[in-house]
Image (cartoon, grey):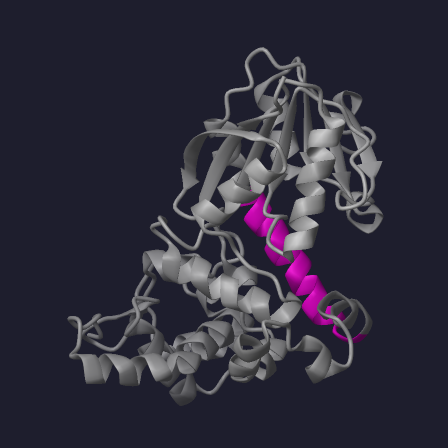
Amino acid sequence: MTTVSPTPQPAMRLRELVFGAACAAAVRAAAQLRVADALGDRPTTAEELAAAVKTEPRPLERLLRTLSCYGIFEETDDGKYLHTDMSRLLREDSPDSLRYISLWCTEPWTWAAWPKLDDAVRSGRSVFDDLYGKGFFQYLHEDAGDSAEVFNRAMTTSSKQSAQDIADLLDLTGASSVADIGGGQGHVLAGLLEKYPALEGTLLDLPSVVAHPDPRLRDGGPLASRVRVVPGDCREDIPVQADVYIIKNILEWDDESTRRTLHNVVKAARPGARVVIIENLVDDSPSMKFTTAMDLLLLLNVGGAKHTKASLVSRMAEAGLKVGEILVVNPYLHAFECTVPE
């Protein structure tokens, strides 16, 4: 039976860490092969799973053994395999599925970018143009359609999963209107409108994004009559007035984009309007291994950065926002409550 071993000595731990690519590749392989989807609730042999996912039994057993060392699947004493809490997250039908997140973080371009991290640290710039001759999103949409699709599915999954946490956390009692700025397909907005039946909402994002909103917000959807969809770039202008503005995970590119977005919110909002900024932090967070890894990936692909609590507060204050309470949304998101001065 394969179990997670006690914390090893520093030399062994470092050896394990420098083989981290093997673990990431193993997770990707399991997600690609849909091993978790094929495994049911009874102990199953590698041979049975291999037949289900159309692989050779022995290599699949080696893959499962590796993943079991990390708590992803469990090997029984008689050499069969069971689900664990983590392996169930690789199932596509899991409500908390991380299958597309796992694929996104291990897409082919990532294996080319990570070895260039020292170059990015020296220059402070994205390595993407040097690798592919074009920017990250241009590359995705022009040269890597499959990767772009994985990205869209991963972002949709992540947004849906955090939307409920945000709706549960935020108290919008007394507000009559809310605007989701850079809100993607509007999952957060839809959750808030469902919680508050009298609330009116606005979704603002790039035209290509808001062309395909959450089905609840589309014409004929249950929330459509209470929603206005505005195509636009929040870095250029925010032609929206609301009692509450939500800004989630869009202040992570360059400082100039952050500055312009916050300035545009303050410019558009009425005095006293509430602004809720929701971000991952690279400090004072229980998920720092996750958020600091995302921070480095942002440096590599778009030259962006995740914030510390202090850096985010500083940028809000510079924009003229009055910063209030900082709330924990979930283990990897914080919400900063701000107001536009009277």
**Residue at image location 81% in from the left, 44% down from the top:** 236
Q: Is residue 106 above or below residue 166?
A: below
Q: Position of residue 177 (x, y in %)?
A: 69, 19
Q: Is residue 150 above or below residue 52?
A: above
**Front one among 338 and 113:** 338
**Residue at image location 75% in from the left, 42% down from the top:** 234
Q: Which residues are magenta?
A: 143-161
**Residue at image location 82% in from the left, 51% down from the top:** 208
Q: Is residue 193 above or below residue 54?
A: above
Left or right, 303 with reference to 335:
right
The answer to whether residue 307 shows anywhere in this view is: yes
Q: Quadrant of residue 221?
A: top right
The answer to whether residue 52 shows anywhere in this view is: no
Q: Quadrant of residue 150?
A: bottom right
Left or right, 307 with reference to 45:
right
Q: Is residue 262 magenta?
A: no
Q: Position of residue 281 (x, y in %)?
A: 45, 50
Left or right, 182 with reference to 237:
left
**Front one among 226 and 321:** 321
Point out the image quarter for the N terminus. bottom left
Q: Position of residue 280 (x, y in %)?
A: 49, 49
**Front one among 173 and 83:** 173
Q: Is residue 156 magenta?
A: yes
Magenta span main SS:
helix
Point out the image quarter for the C terminus. top right
Q: Position of residue 265 (x, y in %)?
A: 70, 33
Number of disc labels = 0
